[in-house]
Every structure is written in C-alpha cells, then in structure tokens.
Amino acid sequence: MLGCAIVRNGAALDPRICDRARIARDPRFDGAFYTGVKTTRIYCRPTCPVKPAKSTNVVFFPTAAAAERAGFRPCLRCRPETAPGTPAWRGAAATVSRALRLIERGFLDGEARVGDLADTLGMTARHLRRLFLRHAGASPTAVATTRRVQRAKALVDGTTLSMSTIAFASGFASIRRFNAAFRAVYRRSPTAVRRARARRAHAAVAEHRAPWHSSGGRNRPWPRAR
C-alpha cells in the first residue's frame, strides 16, 4: 500500500507525515495508520469526515488493535472496520506475516489458543507475543479480537441477521464473549448500536421527505384539496 510505504520509517510511524495526511484526508493513507484523539479517546481513519483535531491532541498507531490496546475506541463516523484491505506491518518478520494471514483466516476463532498458533509456526507462545508487540503493537489475541469485532460491526450495520448468528459468523465461541468484546470496543451493546443506526437512517429519510413550502419553510402543511 502506498500510504504504508510513505508513512513508515522502519518500525515507527513518522508523525509529521501522518499528521499532514490526516489533515488532508489523503485516501492513499487509508488503512496505513490510525489517529487517536487524546481528548475523546477515539481513533479514526486518516479519511475521517469529522473536523480534524489539533495536532497537539493526536497520536498515531500502526494498527486498529494497537489503538484499542492504548485505550481508544473506534470512531462511529469513519468506521475503522471498513478501511480498505488489512493493516500492513512494514518490516514485520515473515513469521508475523504468516501468523497474520492465519488469524485473518480464522485460526484463533472459536476455542483455539495462541499456543496452538505458535506451535503451527514452530515457536513458543511467548516469542510469538513478543514479535507481535514489536511489529503489530498488540498481541495475537488482541489482533484476532479486533478482527472479529470488526467483522461483527459490519454485519450489525449492514444486515438484519440475529445477534447470535452474527456472533458465530464473526468467529466468537459464544454470544457472551461476543457481547463482552463488542461492548469493550464500542462502549455499548451490538443491539444498541444497531438501534442507533436505524434511528439515524429513519431520521435521514424523514428529513429528506419533509415537505417544503416556498413561503413558510420546511414542515409547513400543504393546503388541503377541496
């Protein structure tokens, strides 16, 4: 991804380039990094439509999982779970890249453990966690949980599937774990998020359909036919 190649300098993000990119809402950097706003504890994509925060009030993360590990929650406007592609970790070891692919395919979904993933990669779980913290900014478990929650959020927003169906389709071993992980990220239940989105959609439709009278403005009743 072009954004990653420009932004990253070794294992660290260049805050000057990141700051210019997010202020310009440069789409080339979408998915290359995430911006955490210190005052709201929310993290966003570089293309977020919300008015950019002051440069002194932001911090940058290489992955969504790293932002959440630092205590930030996803923006409900730019929806980090819909960023194009998957986060790229420049300079990551080949084993980490392979682990990320396995996680993306659902290796840690259900009851699988980090130890099982480490065995598949031919290393100890401790060493795998150390590699992830160095290159991804979060543990394998955190990365897997973030991906599951992101998949679930997309289904909550874009489908009418039941929450139990979404939970298992997203890779959670139980509805309880799904609800707990979702609430930990979004500070509200999946059902509450869906209801809020439905209310916003209904309000937008009502606003679009509201009658307009040239002399009296919006919402003035039309004359009745006689």
Image: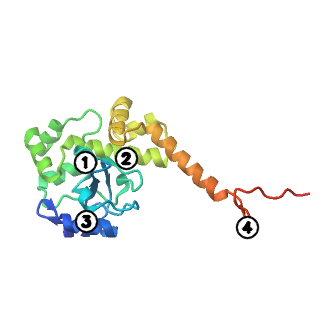
Contact (Cβ within 8 Å) of mark 4 with mark 3:
no
Q: Earlier in the sequence, mark 4 or mark 1?
A: 1
Q: Residues within 10 Å of mark 3 (few under 14, many from 20)?
A: some
Secondary structure of residue under mark 2:
helix
Which image quadrant is residue 145 in? Answer: top left
Mark 4 or 2: in front is 4
Provide the residue designation for mark 2.
151
Q: Which of marks 4 and 3 is nearer the N terminus?
A: 3
| Horizontal relation, residue 96 to residue 75: left or right | left
In the rendered image, the quadrant that contains the N terminus is bottom left
Contact (Cβ within 8 Å) of mark 4 with mark 2:
no
Q: Residues within 10 Å of mark 4 (few under 14, many from 20)?
A: few
Mark 4 or 3: in front is 4
Q: Which of marks 3 and 1 is nearer the N terminus?
A: 3
Residue that lies at the very extreme toward the right in this rendered image: 226
Q: Which of 41 and 64 is in front in this view?
A: 41
Q: Which of marks 3 and 2 is nearer the N terminus?
A: 3
- Relative to residue 55, is residue 145 depicted above or below? above
Q: Which of marks 1 and 2 is nearer the N terminus?
A: 1
Provide the residue designation for mark 4.
214
Marks 4/2: CA distance?
46 Å
Marks 4/1: CA distance?
51 Å
- Tell me residue 113's x, y (percent): 20, 35
Q: Which of 118 and 63 is in front in this view?
A: 63
In the rendered image, the quadrant that contains the C terminus is bottom right
Marks 4/3: CA distance?
45 Å
Identified at 18% across, 58% down, the residue is: 89
Secondary structure of residue under mark 4:
loop
Mark 1 or 2: in front is 1
Mark 3 or 2: in front is 3
- Amino acid type indicated by mark 2: Arg
Provide the residue designation for mark 1.
65
